[in-house]
Structure formats: C-alpha cells, structure tokens
C-alpha cells in the first residue's frame, strides 16, 4: 500500500512527502487554527538561552565534531519529537509530516552563505557522516539552491555566532509558508556555563507557546547529554 503523501502545488511537479492529514474538524485547536490562519502575520517568536556547556566541550579539541552540526543534530531531533513542528498548512487542511529535515545556512569563503539540507539520523555519528559532505557542497560558490515549491518538510535554521541577541525576527515571505525558523546566536560563557541564545519563530495557526516550550525542553535535555 502506498503511503499517504502531502502534495504541495507550486511551479513544476508537486513535492511529495510521507505523512497524513490531520482531522481538523475534531482537532482541539480547530478554533485557534481558524483564527490565526487568517492573520496577516501569523508568526510569533521567542528567544531564550539554553545551556550548551556539554555540547560546547564535546566540540573542542582535535577531531571533535563541529559545534554547529552538533547543535543542529539535537535541534532537529527535538523538532521531530514535537509534532506541532511537523505540521504544515495545505490550504484549509493540515498535513503532518512523518519526519522533517533541517535546512541550514553555511558560511562561504566569500562571506555569503549557502543552504545545506540535513536529514534526521538515529545517532550523531550517522548525522555527522551526512553533514560533512553536505556542508562542503553548500560552501561552494554556485547558484543559491533554495527549497522547491512545496518543499516544506524542513525546519529553517541559521546561525549568528558573532553576536549575542535577546530577540530575533526572520525575513518572512508574507505568511506564504508555515515552516518553523530556529536561529542560534553567539555561545558565551556566563558563570562557568556556556549559554546559547536560541530564537524560535513559528506559525501560530499550527504551533502554540506550549509546543515551543516542549521543543526547547527536549533540545536542552539533548544538549546536556552531549559527550
């Protein structure tokens, strides 16, 4: 039996992903979905510090993994464990992706950036093995590759390791997508701990503050387990 696929129409062939449609009619959030879906700017954002001490220490020294890749791995795992982060709009319906990937910015030598795609993996070793060549590909000075129309089984990630921030807003395309955005800031030492600013921006028709809190809690616990 062929699995369900969430076809999102755009220019060219529709992009398909495995998943299912959510039963909006019986959804406890139906009224909230209908309310915020009609907003001109339905996104809201929060910015918090997470303790990244263990991940920071695990990324130091010769042969150690990239701190960025390590945090991406834990962030993507937390997003996949939080169903609201896998919900996407399909007109008046809601699609639930089985899994989502990370689309992350990668700095190039000419100080522009490219986009790299990171699929989820059961462990960091597998994730890192895929990430190393993908990072190298994204660093090449070529045409900027952006997601195909309807390719929204993603969590948009970016990093500003040069600055610490306490608030952040992303460039949005007029609410035409419902993809969550996660941005990492400069990881600084405070009181003997390494604190990482994390900004999360989500579509309120699909995601509530409690969902963001659950994602952040899972992310924090995963970071603390880094070795």
Image (cartoon, rainbow, N blue to C red):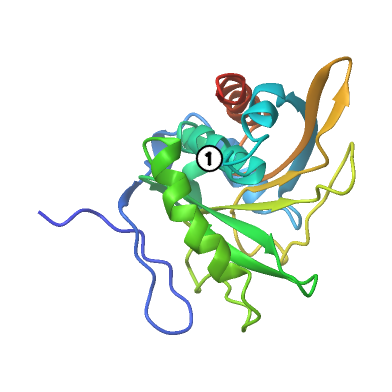
Residue 223 appears left or right of 122: right
Residue 186 appears left or right of 19: right
Q: Is residue 132 visible?
A: yes
From this viewpoint, which residue is outermost toward the left? 1
Pick whichever, 148 or 114, lies toward us: 114
From this viewpoint, which residue is outermost toward the front? 62
**Count of marks, rendered view:** 1
Which residue is pictured at 58% across the width and 37% down the height? 75
Asked if residue 202 is positioned above or below residue 40 in the image, the reply reads above
Which corner quadrant of the image does residue 57 belong to? top right
Which residue is pictured at 38% across the width and 74% down the height? 14
Residue 18 appears left or right of 171: left
Q: Is residue 203 visible?
A: no
> Quick one: quadrant of the C terminus?
top right
Q: Report crowding for label 1: few under 14, some 14 to 19, many 20 or more residues within 10 A (C-alpha).
A: many
Position in image of residue 142 (x %, y %): 62, 83
Q: Which residue matches tag 1? A: 73
Pick whichever, 108 or 96, lies toward us: 108
Which residue is pictured at 49% across the width and 29% down the height? 28
């Amino acid at each position: 039996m062929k699995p369900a696929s969430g076809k999102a129409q755009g220019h060219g062939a529709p992009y398909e992903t495995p998943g299912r449609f959510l039963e909006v009619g019986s959804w406890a959030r139906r009224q909230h979905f209908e309310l915020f879906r009609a907003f001109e700017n339905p996104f809201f954002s929060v910015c918090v510090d997470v303790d990244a001490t263990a991940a920071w220490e695990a990324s130091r020294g010769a042969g150690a993994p990239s701190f960025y890749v390590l945090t991406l791995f834990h962030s993507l795992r937390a997003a996949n464990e939080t169903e609201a982060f896998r919900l996407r709009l399909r007109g008046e319906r809601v699609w639930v992706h089985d899994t989502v990937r990370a689309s992350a910015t990668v700095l190039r030598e000419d100080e522009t950036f490219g986009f790299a795609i990171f699929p989820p993996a059961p462990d960091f070793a597998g994730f890192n093995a895929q990430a190393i060549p993908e990072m190298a590909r994204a660093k090449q000075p070529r045409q900027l590759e952006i997601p195909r129309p309807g390719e929204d089984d993603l969590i948009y990630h970016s990093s500003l390791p040069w600055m610490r921030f306490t608030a952040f807003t992303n460039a949005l395309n007029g609410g035409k997508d419902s993809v969550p955005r996660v941005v990492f800031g400069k990881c600084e030492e405070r009181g003997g701990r390494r604190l990482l600013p994390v900004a999360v921006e989500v579509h309120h028709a699909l995601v509530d503050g409690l969902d963001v809190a659950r994602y952040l809690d899972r992310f924090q616990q995963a970071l603390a387990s880094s070795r």
